[in-house]
Amino acid sequence: MNKLFVYINGILAGELWLDDQNRFCFQYSKEWLGDQDSFHLSVSLPLQEKPFLKDSCYSYFTNLLPEAKVLTALSRKLGIAEEDKFSMLQAIGGDCAGAVSLYPPGVDHLGPNDYKYEPFSEKDLAKKIAELGVNPLLAAEERRLSLAGGMEKLPVYIKDNRIYLPLNGAPTTHIIKTPVKDLQGVVTNEAYCMSLAKNMGFDVPDIDILKVRDISLYAVKRYDRKTSGQGIVRLVQEDFCQAMNRNSQQKYNYSLKDCFDLIRRECSNPIEDSRRLFNLVLFNGLIGNADGHAKNISLLHNENGTTLAPFYDLVSTLVYPQFTKKMAMRVAGKKRNFAHLQKHHFDSLSEEINMKSNVVIKTALNLANRIMTVSEITAMEFKAKYGSLEMVDKINAVISFHSKSLIDTLSDDSVQR
């Protein structure tokens, strides 16, 4: 029987296996259920003795894997069919998003005292990065690393400004993203949008642009890891696809209502997290991020309850003409261009997300006015640190257009109440 042991920070939490029809099945271990400090892996997988059968856990586990061209390259490198998600997890599931680590029988799982890392010179790291297109996540080296998404990236351990690569699924502290051939300036793009979000008061991880030889790399600190006296601890998190028990191919098939309903059901402070998510929706619209899908929003679970995770993957997609201008999620029943939203769309949205219309409009106007000032300040700071970059000016032009358009739409006498 195909089987994987599921560990959380070195403790056996359960077993994942395939039944005789190759369907995913999962069951929490008795030891895990008997621990008063145990917690569920996902809101879609509540703590229970009864196993999750017939692919009912499929979406949670397969959402841990890469997608699109990265999955295709991984398939070629490892000789595993793209559709064989279980074997993929078996091969690379040592260090995943969130707290889980997956190990096959006979392979020793890593406890906090077993973590090992390999230091790399600039030359060696540049070589590894250049190989990611054909050796994604360095899978051929059996480092057992997995990250969702369709872009080339690499989880690393950074300490004292030195970059290390993990061995055999040891936890990492940062994620490095590489330049993308068809998306000129995307490293600058994401770094600037994340810096702007932080200056606007959003909860986002620390970021930086690293130079390795002549390559600019985007580095983001992992919010699902924390360093303690016991080393690196993995934190329990899940993206909205996992929480709503949908596979990654459905990440665009959501409305904002679906997401706000999830927050009301699961978050410990649903009013505050609804406010945070609405501000994110507005921010994405203003910067021209039409890729704010359900895998780009996550829940973070800890001893204090469940909350929205810090925001990530903030990129202005509208600066690239090949991308759609329509928002990733449905507003008032349809996917819409943010610049074309009218007051009645915001009225419909307020009903969908259970927020008063005057609060929705006041929040939108406030954010649109603030971002024009904050983006100018952030641009000056960003250019002083990283150099004068054309991409920053392109993004700020999108922000200015969207902000002025939104203010014009919502500032007439009929909405002043």
Image (cartoon, helix red, strand yellow):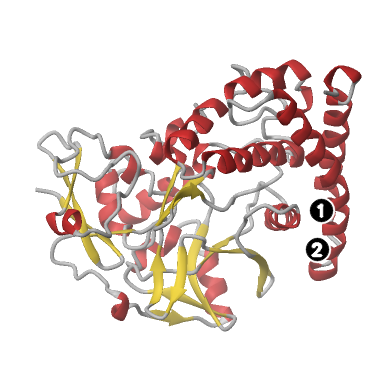
Residue topped by disc 2? 382
For disc 1, the marked residue is: 392
Q: Residues within 10 Å of mark 2 (few under 14, many from 20)?
A: some
Tell me the quarter of the picture where residue 138 sits.
Answer: bottom left
Give percent across and percent down for residue 147: 44, 54
Query: x, y (%) of residue 329?
Result: 58, 29
Q: Residue at x 38, y 49 (%)?
A: 64
Query: Who's the residue at 84% across and 52% down the image?
Result: 374
Amino acid on which disc 2 is placed: Phe
Q: Position of residue 10 (x, y in %)?
A: 26, 68
Label 2: element kind: helix
Residue 265, label in figure: none
Q: Is residue 210 above or below residue 366?
A: below
Q: Residues within 10 Å of mark 1 (few under 14, many from 20)?
A: many
Q: Is 415 rendered above or below residue 131?
A: above
Mark sitting earlier along the chain (1/2): 2
Numbered disc total: 2
Q: Nearer the viewer, residue 176 or 128?
A: 176
User: Looking at the image, do the residues carrying marks 1 and 2 touch, with CB atoms under 8 Å apart?
Assistant: yes
Judge whether residue 147 can be spotted in this image.
yes
The residue located at (36%, 80%) in the rendering is 116
Front: mark 1 or 2: 2
The kind of residue tagged 1 is Val
* Mark 1 and mark 2: Cα distance apart in space: 9 Å
- What percent of the width, then of the height, locates residue 397? 86, 42
